[in-house]
Image (cartoon, rainbow, N blue to C red):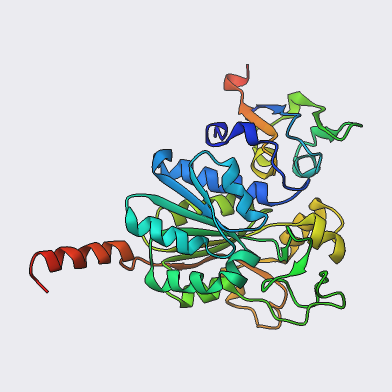
Amino acid sequence: MPKKGEVSIIEKRCKGCNICATYCPKKILGLREDGKMEVKDPDNCIACDLCELRCPDYAIKVEVKENNE
Amino acid sequence: MELEKYFRENKLPHIWCPGCGHGTVMSSIIRGIDKAGWDPNKVVVVSGIGCSSRAPGYMDFNTLHTVHGRAIAFATGIKLANPELKVIVLTGDGDGAAIGGNHLIHACRRNIGIKVVLFNNYIYGMTSGQYSPMTPEGSLATTSPYGNIEPPFDLCELTKSANANFVARGTVYHTRPLISYMEKAFAKDGFSYVEAISQCPTYYGRRNRLKSPVEMLEWQKKNSVDIKKAADMEPEELQGKIVTGIFADREKEEYTARYDRLISEIQGGKK
């Protein structure tokens, strides 16, 4: 089974640089009108971690969902 | 990996600009420290002055924010006083290559067990964008309004020639390899140098037609050449490229070990 992930945003830290959304292979992230990042399509996260690894503000976390629960 | 336990959470969000690569370099360093499995109480993180040098303020280790260019000198004292400590220096292209360049080459020459991570964003960001010894030729800065006429240092070649045990260069865009260089650098006993190509969207990017953090990452992606591929390329083809990879990986004896050995030889009456 393909990996599934759960993404969360720490809004206090997000500066809206858009790096995570640009490089998300599933395009599940997008900027809100107030300039903070938002998870628009949470079910499609494949837990690749690219957003968390690149986020310069430690504002995004990915947790791997066990057994696709 | 859980980063939070290594942060001084009350100091976040940090002061770096939106999209600044320094945050990514810092998290890559923390991931490297975690992999090394060090006791945080035995880790000392030392910095000088500049945007890069703000990083230790956010990291929950023993940290020291020193004077401009002299982080390696302080770190040398720490390592010699207590060789058991894991000493990491965080510096920038201005701090480490200009005012601190001399300390850097001599730390390499001695092969003292300090790990230096140089955040190279090609500019003096904190003082609003003067060119540094790493700024590419032709780049615009407040002090080079018609384009920089000075050629930049290749600090990986320099530190390699100066006897560093481990030398690597990575970019923020290629985050996983960058983390792997941190891991390898931290596993070494001798002197390690990792150059992390970072992006300064505020004072480098906007002046040099790279209008957003993402454009700057795309620039890193487009211009990076792996060291193995670079070996088959002509110098003209490599002009303006970022050569990434491991430049040196050797096991020469570390300085404090040599120093301690000398002391025990003298005490044992062998000298």
Residue reaching furthest to the top? A69
Report which quarter residue B222 is drawn in.
bottom right
| Image location (x, y in percent) of residue B109 | 41, 74
Q: Position of residue B230 (x, y in %)?
A: 61, 73
**Residue at the outermost front position:** B67
Position of B257 with respect to B94 (left or right) is: left
Q: Is residue B173 left or right of residue B209?
A: left
Residue B101, above or below B59: below
Where does the image place residue B156, in percent across and percent down from the top left?
Answer: 55, 71
Q: Residue at x 58, y 54 (%)?
A: B178
For image coordinates 61% across by 23% down, the residue present is A65
The quadrant of the image that shows the N terminus of chain B is top right
Question: How many callouts does the rendering have?
Answer: 0
Could you tell me which residue is drawn at 48 percent across and 73 percent down?
B105
Tell me if residue B188 can be seen. no
A37 sits left or right of B191 in the view = right
Residue B267 in view: yes
State the quadrant of the C terminus of chain B.
Answer: bottom left
In this picture, residue B240 sits left or right of residue B45: right
Instruction: Please tell me which residue lies in front, B96 or B28.
Output: B96
- Depth order, front residue of B7/B215: B7
Against B63, is B130 above or below?
A: below
